[in-house]
Amino acid sequence: MDQVQVHPTGFVKSTDPGNPTKFLAAEALRGEGGILLNGLGRRFVNELDTRDQVTDAMNKFCSAPDTRARHSASTEEIPKEPLTAAFLVLSQAAADSFGHGALGFYEKMGLMSRAGGLEELAAALRVDQAVLRKTLQDHDSARDKGTHDEFGKSVFPQSALNPLTPSDDKLQIQIQYYWGIVTPSIHYTMGGVRFDDMARVLRAADGAPIPGLLAAGEVTGGLHGANRLGGNSLLECVVYGREAGRQAATLVTSAFSA
Ligand SMILES: Cc1cc2nc3c(=O)[nH]c(=O)nc-3n(C[C@H](O)[C@H](O)[C@H](O)COP(=O)(O)OP(=O)(O)OC[C@H]3O[C@@H](n4cnc5c(N)ncnc54)[C@H](O)[C@@H]3O)c2cc1C
């Protein structure tokens, strides 16, 4: 039970920032080009690093009192919780790539907002516009060069900076930034009952199978080491669910035939 995975991006709802239950900001938001900014409008981590690394960086660089990402949009007052929070920002290209179905849902839930341009985004995040512009430009220049950036990021799914908004009003409203506030959230338990490749639960004392006790899913431990990669719950749920079922069927069959 000491192997608890913290997911770096649980949404902080601006109207309910202290709620201990968070809605997950899907990994794909960063996977499709979303970037993380501290309260000063600067990047601080490779957004595509493992969950533990991103969480560590957030705790290091986005904790009270140096972040304004904790602010509630509805009030000037800084809430006491969460202590750590960062801005998640998507350019129009990243948003298009992520998909507007799920994005629209986040917006409807009050978890993400839009900003029409860089000036509007800086105002919404309450960060210096020049700092924000440089942050996005630096990201894109590493992307253009095809190199590692200062955080070790080498895959840049999309530009962070939107193209200059055209003068045509109709087109202008189509190019926007999408942003939300995120905080590390308890997500998953890598630990659990010890079991073997036949899904049999093993006794802690001597490692022998406990007769008739099978396990699958998150209650089991040890499959992922100390850091599960996203999406891999299928292993303990599906693969071992099937194996546990097969073993249970064998036990029942042999009980009837005995
Ligand atoms: C927000 C979120 C997003 C995730 N996204 C992904 C993803 O994209 N890909 C992925 O692979 N994994 C993902 N995971 C992890 C994955 O969903 C879980 O590891 C998986 O669902 C666990 O399945 P399970 O059946 O073992 O446990 P659970 O789904 O937790 O089921 C346990 C069940 O047991 C019931 N229960 C508990 N106690 C008792 C009791 N005493 N008596 C009777 N019933 C009881 C509970 O009510 C529950 O229904 C995500 C997890 C979270 C929280």
Image (cartoon, grey):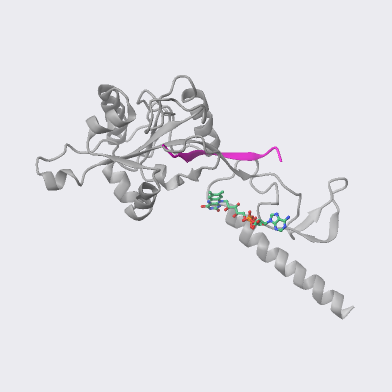
Identify which residue, 44 or 140, lies in the foreground: 44
Specify whether 57 is left or right of 76: right
Specify whether 141 is left or right of 256: left
Residues drawn in magenta: 1-14
The residue lying at 24 percent from left, 42 percent from top is 176
Quarter of the image for residue 241 reads: bottom right
Identify which residue, 29 or 243, lies in the foreground: 29
Q: Position of residue 240 (x, y in %)?
A: 67, 60
Question: Outermost residue toward the right?
Answer: 258
Identify which residue, 140 or 188, lies in the foreground: 188
The residue lying at 53 percent from left, 29 percent from top is 56
Q: Position of residue 179 (x, y in %)?
A: 35, 38
> Within the displayed image, which quadrant is ligand 1 positioned in?
bottom right
The residue lying at 25 percent from left, 22 percent from top is 130
Which of the image's four quarters has the C terminus?
A: bottom right
Specify whether 223 is left or right of 100: right
Question: Outermost residue toward the bottom?
Answer: 257
* Residue 109 can be seen in this image: yes
